[in-house]
Every structure is written in C-alpha cells, then in structure tokens.
C-alpha cells in the first residue's frame, strides 16, 4: 500500500453521519444485495430522515436484509425513503402486509432479469449514489466488493457517481473483477460488524426425493448453477460421488462451497475461467464467508457478465437448477407471485435457463414440490395465477417428487400429459379434465 493510497484513504474517511450528509434529498441511491448492504450508513441515513434532514430518497436494490428492514425501510419512513425493489424477500412481504392494512400501495418493484439490472440502474434509472460494504483496502489501493459484486461494480463505474463505502474487516476479500479503487471513492466509513447470516434451509422428505432425482441428471464434468433454498441444497448434498464439476453461478451457496471443499468441484473441465469457481454474490453462514476470504480458486464478477446467457453458454454442459411456484400445462412458470402479491421476482432464473440450454450438452432444470399449502394446492395448474417468469418456450426439464420430464420437442398435448404425470395423484384427474376443456389434447384424446 503506497503513501498515496493511505493519504487518499485518510482524506475520505468520515463518520457515518458525515457520509450520509453528502446524500441530498431527491437522490437515486443503489445498494448491493444482502451482505453488501452497509449497516452504519443505512442507520445514519434513517436517523437523518427521521430528523427531517433528507426527503424523497429512492433506494434501489435486490433482496434486502433485516439491516435495511429495521433502518431505512422502517414503515414510519416510507414517505421519505422509498424502496424500489428488483427482488422481494421477507422484508418487502412484511412491509406489504403493513401497507395493505393502512390502505397504502405495495412496495414498488421493477420487473427485470438480474443480468439487466446494472443497465437498468445506470441507463434507465440514472442512479447518482452507491452505498456498499467492502473489504479493507488492499496493497494496490483497491476495495473488494467481496460477497456482493452483483450490479454494484457496474454502478460504481458510472461517471459522476457518488460513492460511499463502508469498510468492514469481516467482509471477505474476494478476487476477480470486483474491485473499487480508493481514488474513485467519495467517502469512507469504518464499521466492523458481522455480516448477515442465511442459515441453511432444513430439507424434508420431498426435498430429498427431488434432490436425488436432480442429482441423477448431473454428470461428471458438468458446470453448475444453483438457486437458493432447501431444494438446491438437497441437490448439492447428493453430488458427493461426482467428479470434476465446475461452478459458474450467480449465487455462491454453502452447498456449492462444500462441493469445492470436498474436491467434487475442481473446475477442470470448464471452457472459461478454468480452475476457478465464478459467482456474483454470496449469502450464507460464517463458514461460507470464511471459505471465500482470499481463496485463490474463487472469483467474483459483475452480474451483467456472470448472468449473461452468452457467457453462461460458453461452458459446455452447463446445468442450472432453479425452483418455481407454479407450472401451467403448457410449461410456463410463475416463480415470483403468490396469493395475488409479489413474493420474490424474476432474478436470474431466465438468464440461466437460456444460458444453460444454449451451452453444448447443457440442461436447464426447474424443480418444485408437486403441492403447496400442506398439500391442498397443486403447483401444476391449468393456468398461472401470476406473471410468466420462464416462458413455455424456454422451459426445458421439469422435476417434482414424482419424476422428471424433458419438455423440449413436446407438443402442447404431450406437455400437458407429461406435466400431469408429475402432479400429485390427488390432482391428476382434475388437471386432465382441465386440459380436455382447454382443448390441449389433439383430437379429443
């Protein structure tokens, strides 16, 4: 670390209160996903808003944590700090419940593929400020975005951006295209605190059954992308006997990290970043963050690269595994809407569905339980009750606890029959009648 870097660091160092004073009313602020959300800066911004010092701040983000939920997204601040979500989680669902009780509109959402969020923020929204948590400055005067490169790196490079960083010694130092030079920074805040923890979701018998089916579709040498939750974790737990797997994924999970530790993943058969596991954000327990820290075999890159379907397709035999909430009899998936409200969002599902299928020998897998609401509702339905996340033209392999089917090359009638066979037996007759009524079976079969 040179004297110039040290001098620039000292010049930009501020208290959290001083740093947020640089954000004027009317600002369009971006913050990274989850672990990249800066708690001291968010708390100071909330305090300033409560005191009437700032107004009409629009905060753009994906998947916020409780840190934001208990500070800037306090219900009492909703007219001063306005959440603009690209992906809902528990915080937004709780806010929506409260807002509904007060006859207020739900948290606003921007429909967008994850790969396109950087362009949306920079070109269409025109954000003017980025707040983010980073690892301590390295010898070259750079801050690693660590667990949350996502769209933050691209936003940090927007000309004229106001860049306020929270330096946290507990943020893992990750290599790759994820660095912000100290010379670009407007203000620095130091705050050493634990990162948000996402404990592994407990699996049940259905998860384990689906996990075994999906793992049976994975071959040695495949390049993996896994989504979030009990189902992908169940898949990872069944891959211990595989060899020479690779990782190119939007989210680095504990399950994937365990495969690297066990030697199941060595990235030796990839065509890009050979020998390296590639991700754009990570969320998990402390052991995951410890695994990422200064690991020479792991790299973080911005989401407009990692989730670009063309980039994904450059690795042969890419396999994506994602969950959904509903599948209609044509094969279209609703992965984001539940009970008439936004539950999550598109995220990177379509990016990897298309990228994996476009790779040589690639497979895109959509997995779900056959039922919801303790078995009272079928997830395979005559028609979706929410938006189409993955279109029927894109859906490739579908898995439930009753087996799997490849929809590619199947007609509408063949799709309906194949999907009904994956539904829970209690709903198959009803679905068959619906398919007949909708004229999905040619010649009245």
Image: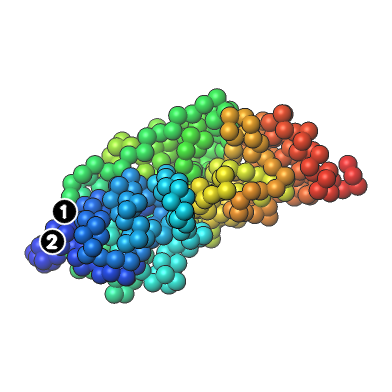
Looking at this view, is 399 or 275 the one in front?
399
Find disc 2 in the rendering and name its residue.
13
Q: Identify the residue shown where x is 79% and y is 49%.
A: 411
Q: Residue at x 28, y 69 (%)?
A: 25
Q: Is residue 282 visible in this depiction of the protein?
A: no
Q: Position of residue 351 (x, y in %)?
A: 53, 56
Q: Are marks 2 and 1 in contact (CB under 8 Å)?
A: yes
Q: Quadrant of residue 27?
A: bottom left
x, y (%) of residue 151? 39, 60
Colour approach in the figure: rainbow
How many numbered discs, if any?
2
Question: At 41% across and 60% down in the image, what residue appears?
Answer: 84
Work out which quarter of the rendered image holds the C terminus and state it. top right
Q: Is residue 293 left or right of residue 327?
A: left
Q: Circle 1: is it few (<14), some (14-19), or many (20+) Cα within 10 Å?
A: some
Residue 262 is drawn in which quadrant? top left
Residue carrying label 1: 190
Q: Secondary structure at mark 1?
A: strand
Q: For the view shown, which residue lies furthest in the front direction?
A: 102
Real-space Cα separation, disc 2 to disc 1, in angstroms: 8 Å
| Residue 308 image offset from top left, x and y in percent | 50, 60
**358, 283: nearer the viewer:** 283
Could you say where residue 313 lies in the image, as x and y percent from the top left?
55, 56
Query: Furthest residue to the top?
Result: 205
Residue 347 visible (yes or no): yes
Mark seen at residue 9:
none
Work out which quarter of the rendered image holds the N terminus and state it.
bottom left
Horizontal side of residue 325 vs 272, given as left or right: right
């Amino acid at each position: 670390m040179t004297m110039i870097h040290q001098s620039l660091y000292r010049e930009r160092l501020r208290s959290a209160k001083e740093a947020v004073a640089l954000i004027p009313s009317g600002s369009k602020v971006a913050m990274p996903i989850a672990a990249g959300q800066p708690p001291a800066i968010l708390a100071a911004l909330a305090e300033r808003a409560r005191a009437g010092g700032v107004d009409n701040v629009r905060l753009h983000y994906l998947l916020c944590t409780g840190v934001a939920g208990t500070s800037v997204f306090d219900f009492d601040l909703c007219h001063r700090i306005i959440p603009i979500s690209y992906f809902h989680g528990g915080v937004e669902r709780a806010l929506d419940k409260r807002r509904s009780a007060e006859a207020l509109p739900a948290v606003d959402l921007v429909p967008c593929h994850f790969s396109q969020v950087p362009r949306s923020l920079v070109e269409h929204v025109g954000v003017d400020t980025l707040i983010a948590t980073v690892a301590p400055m390295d010898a070259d005067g750079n801050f690693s975005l660590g667990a949350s490169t996502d769209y933050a790196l691209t936003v940090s490079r927007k000309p004229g951006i106001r860049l306020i960083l929270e330096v946290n010694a507990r943020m893992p130092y990750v290599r790759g295209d994820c660095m912000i030079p100290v010379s670009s920074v407007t203000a620095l805040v130091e705050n050493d605190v634990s990162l948000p923890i996402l404990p592994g979701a407990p699996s049940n018998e259905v998860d384990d059954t689906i996990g075994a089916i999906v793992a049976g579709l994975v071959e040695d040498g495949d390049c993996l992308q896994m989504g979030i939750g009990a189902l992908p974790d169940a898949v990872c737990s069944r891959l211990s006997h595989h060899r020479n797997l690779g990782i190119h994924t939007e989210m680095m999970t504990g399950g994937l990290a365990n495969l690297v530790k066990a030697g199941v993943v060595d990235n030796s058969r990839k065509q890009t970043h050979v020998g390296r596991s590639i991700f754009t954000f990570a969320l998990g327990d402390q052991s995951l963050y410890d695994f990422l820290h200064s690991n020479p075999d792991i790299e973080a890159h911005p989401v407009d690269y990692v989730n670009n379907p063309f980039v994904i397709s450059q690795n042969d035999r890419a396999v994506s595994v994602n969950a959904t909430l509903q599948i209609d009899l044509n094969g279209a998936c609703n992965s984001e809407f539940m009970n008439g409200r936004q539950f999550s969002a598109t995220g990177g599902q379509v990016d990897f569905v298309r990228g994996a299928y476009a790779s040589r020998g690639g497979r895109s897998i959509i997995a779900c339980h056959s039922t919801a609401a303790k078995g009272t509702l079928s997830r395979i339905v005559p028609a979706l009750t929410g938006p189409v996340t993955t279109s029927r033209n894109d859906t490739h392999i579908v898995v439930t606890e009753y087996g799997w089917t490849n929809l590619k090359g199947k007609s509408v009638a063949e799709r309906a029959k194949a999907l009904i066979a994956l539904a829970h037996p209690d709903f198959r007759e009803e679905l068959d009648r619906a398919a007949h009524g909708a004229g999905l079976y040619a010649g009245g079969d």
